Image (cartoon, helix red, strand yellow):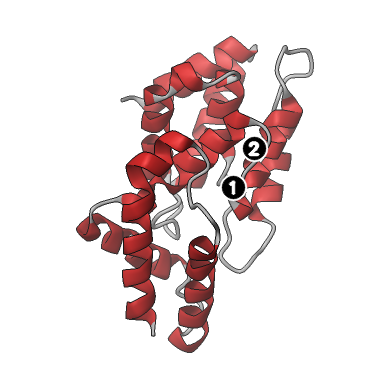
Amino acid sequence: MNLKEKYTELLINIGFEEKQIQRNWLDLEKTYSNKSRYYHNLTHIADMVKCYDTYLQKLEFPNEVLFAIFYHDYIYKSSKKDNELKSAEYALSILPENISFDKQLVFDAICATQQHQHNIIEDINWLIDFDLKILARDWDEYQIYFEQIRKEYSIYPDFLYKPGRAKALKHFLENEFIYQTEEFRNLYEEKARINIEKEIALLS
């Protein structure tokens, strides 16, 4: 899959001019390719776009969901707690004014990737599940994932990082479900819980 082509096609559909698209793509590519991004990078975006392609027919607002995928981690600083809000604000700031596009949905969808809680809008639930599909990977891949996350938080020593990471993981287990759509629950819920429990054990 060519991410640039996917992005270009989306922005044409939304109503961007060609020169804007090229400029925005280069900006997006540079941002997600920052050397500090071991996990929240273009590979993560590509994985989410694959999910999007798989479940496209389930979405009521596909353009909004895809745009939210591209920008949901645009701002990512491990020391900050408002990354999603700042990403949502940035995503809206680059949109042309006169487009038939649900800006509020994009904003809400990106912000929802912070808490990963069930939403009354089903498209947002799909986006949340695309974002969390990594939790149900095979153990070898899941290990690579949490090692990449540790590198992104390298400014924190283990005595701060480990309890913080364990707390965040336990939060997933305390919810009735990790995944918000019935499809993802049936496919991935059990495996994600096993992976999370194994990682928590390693953190203790």
Q: Which residue lies at the image location 67% right of the left edge and 45% below the top edge?
A: 111
Q: Which percent across, then down, holds residue 59?
A: 53, 21
Please state if 173 lies on the left or on the right of 125 as rendered: left
Would you place residue 42 above or below residue 22 in this image? below
Name the residue tied to disc 2. Answer: 109
Please state if 80 lies on the left or on the right of 191 as rendered: right
Name the residue tied to disc 1. Answer: 113
Would you place residue 159 above or below residue 148 in this image? below
The residue carrying pointer 2 sits among few (fewer than 14), some (14 to 19) or many (20 or more) residues within 10 Å by Cα, namely many
**Amino acid on which disc 2 is placed:** Ala
Q: Which residue lies at the image location 48% right of the left edge and 46% below the top edge?
A: 179
Query: Looking at this view, is 157 or 34 the one in front?
Result: 157
Cα distance in 3D space between marks 1 and 2: 7 Å
Quadrant in the rendering for residue 15: top right
Task: Point out the image quarter for the N terminus.
Answer: top left
The residue carrying pointer 1 sits among few (fewer than 14), some (14 to 19) or many (20 or more) residues within 10 Å by Cα, namely many
Query: Looking at this view, is 180 or 68 the one in front?
Result: 180
Q: How many marks?
A: 2
> Do labels 1 and 2 touch, CB within 8 Å?
yes
